[in-house]
Image: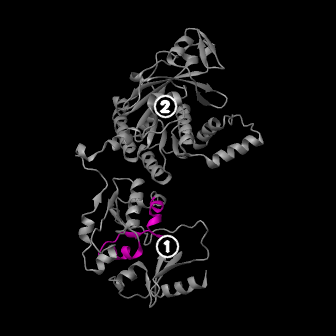
Amino acid sequence: MSIQFYHILEDWLNLTARDYRSISKETFLKTGVYVGENDVAFPYGKNSQSPDLFKTWILSTKSMRLEKSGDLPESYQMPFFNQQNFEDKSYLIVTEGEWDCLSWIEAGYENVVSIPTGSSSAAGVFKREFKNYLSQFKKVYVNFDNDEAGLIALEQVKVDFPKDKLMTILINLPGIKDANDLLKKGFDLKPFFDNAESMYSARMKHSSSYKIEDLIEEASSMLMSGFESIDNLLKGIRPGEITIITGDSGVGKTTLACNIALSFSEVNKENIWVTSQEMSDKKLFIKIASAALKINIRENNLTKQEKDRCNNWLKNSFVIADPLGSVKIDYKDILDTLESARYENGIKLAVIEDIGALVDAAPGDKLENYSKIMLALHKKAAETGVHIFLIAHPTQSKDDKGFMGMANIKGSSSVKQYADNVLIVQRCDRAYPGNSKVKDLVKVSVSKNRMFGSEGLAILKYHAKYDGYEDTNIGYTDFQALTRESSYSASTGKCTF
């Protein structure tokens, strides 16, 4: 503990205050703010009885300094000022600075906090504190300064925060920058709160609200997966959509989903989240790391060099797994975690295995659960902009060759209805037994494509050694020839006729 911190702490423990900047002594005492003759000390820390640090405002020079407790770790990150477990969860006001926070409290609002280090850090603080703090409030009201820095910070916060939660309190009056200015000039703050604007768009919007550039941007918002044959059909992975991946039992649905997601993450340098109701997080990482590095981790005979490669990949990958996926099977909890992964870790794609397990774990009628869960997934994808790969099992097949269509997807019609894309996976060694030319190939049929792509067939090669897929340049005609016993060159990936 520094000597300066000790002196401030000593003053703080003998808390004194006075009216200042139109804020009453009672408000200062209520929030634990020390007001001396020449300084004001704002306590920071989640334990109100023992601050981690003081942010001190020197009245004579109008400058700030931080005085930290000596036992804080280097990784310590300041919480919001006045951050506490408010009983009322219906709202929270977040201001740019401590004086504005105190002004709202002075105006009669209890649930008020402020950004610890100014507008430039707002977006990062919102992302960091989303899961453990901000997400518990029904509405979060943002009141930043009416200046360029405040407006920029507001736009940055909007990008990565749920629009149904976010409200903005605008102070658009000449000569007034913030809530404390309003208070000092005698304004009632309640009308500003009552007229806060929601980020939700109205249900009616005339075409004149749009420009062609907006529509082009929407049409081109997809990101490529890195599997060219699939990208050519889907025209990329688009935000807010659901892609169903289905196929016969043991065909490799989850493996394919993880392979495409892995490629997507590496090509675009974007985080992905994977949850499995059938595998532990460690088994998921064995599967994904094996495909990423093209080595067989399952056999547990790695060389030192291979182990080093694995550790380096684990340290630097873009993959986030759900350690509770196979333990806590609850679709609401999974959707909450997906939302947290979106706003804390910026994920763009999620893999969920599988819809059947979520339905079985939910109480009530199974067909109704399919509809309810698919609607919930559809809404969450649209709200967050996360593309969801959803594994779906088929109904009982008539044979062991794995031929199936949309009608064979298990569950109610809502599974097909809410899906934007449907990929049907079929192993060629099952479909065409005895044909050695196709034994390592896998058919991926795009059987539904709601928007910009097309239906069709992609042929991938499966590598059993490391449980991974790779593209081939085998087209539909070539594949038909292969299955008619035409000769096939593995080196060129082409058929000869």
Work out how far the residue at label 2 is from the one at label 1, CA to CA, in angstroms: 52 Å
Answer whether residue 110 is magenta in the image.
yes
The percent coordinates of residue 366 (x first, y second) are 37, 33
Q: Secondary structure at mark 2?
A: helix
Q: The disc labelled 1 sits on which kind of residue?
A: Asn
| Disc nearer the start of the sequence (2/1) | 1
| Quadrant of residue 493 within the rendered picture | top right
**Disc 2 target residue:** 231
Taking the image as shown, residue 425 lies to the left or right of residue 209, namely right
Q: Is residue 18 above or below residue 385?
A: below
Q: Determine whether, in the image, residue 418 is placed left or right of residue 393.
A: left
Q: What SS does tag 1 mark?
A: loop
Q: Residue at x 54, y 11 (%)?
A: 481
> Which residue is depicted at the point 61% across and 31% down?
468
Query: Which of the two discs, 2 and 1, sits closer to the camera?
Result: 2
Q: Residues within 10 Å of mark 1 (few under 14, many from 20)?
A: few
Q: What amino acid type is highlighted by mark number 2?
A: Asp
Span colored in magenta:
97-126
Q: Position of residue 334 (x, y in %)?
A: 45, 45
**Magenta stretch: residue 148 in it?**
no
Task: Tell me the number on the disc at residue 47.
Answer: 1
